[in-house]
Image (spheres, grey):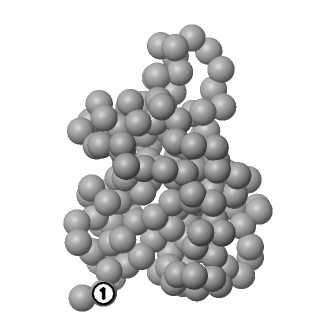
Amino acid sequence: MDKTRVLFLCTGNSARSQMAEAFLRKLGGDRFEAFSAGLEPKGVHPVTKQVMEEIGIDMSFHTSKHLDAYLGKMHFSYVITVCSHADASCPAVFPGAGKRLHWDFEDPAAFEGPETETLEKFRQVRDQIRVRIQGWIQEQARH
């Protein structure tokens, strides 16, 4: 059985797309291959790794990658943008992409506030992404 290859795309590839990739790897079993990239990679945010470790997902091997690492080099069944900037800036015709989806999540890395509130913002976005990934996996199982 061929795996469904999915690319999650956001601006910095530091939080949302990284979380989505990690959740699909963990929850999708052997049905999916998950990747992530950014239009302007900034490195994986340390709080991203922290909040994912809180729920048992090790992201120590994750690195930020530029979209160019995949563009025209790999076929994806789905390219899923997880921020409005990436959705607007991603090439309309993405070479090697099947379907393009957009799931807009707030950028926890852009949040400014005390450390406790920053952690809470990352957790909120993490949990929203987990719910969306779980629902999407269930949708895919019906097809």
Direction from residue 70 to residue 26 in the image, left or right: left
Q: Of residues 120 and 37, which is closer to you in this image?
A: 37
Give the labeled residue for mark 1.
2
Q: Of residues 107 and 68, which is closer to you in this image?
A: 68
Q: Position of residue 41 (x, y in %)?
A: 64, 50
The kind of residue tagged 1 is Asp
Q: Is residue 3 visible?
A: yes
Q: Residue at x 46, y 36 (%)?
A: 48
Query: In terms of image quadrants, where is residue 88?
Result: bottom right
Q: Quadrant of the N terminus?
A: bottom left
Direction from residue 77 to residue 93 in the image, left or right: right
Q: Residue at x 57, y 43 (%)?
A: 43
Instruction: Indicate the secondary structure of the residue bearing disc 1.
Output: loop
Q: Residue at x 27, y 36 (%)?
A: 55
> From the viewer's perspective, is residue 45 above or below residue 112?
below
Name the outermost residue toward the bottom.
Answer: 1
Q: Is residue 104 visible?
A: no
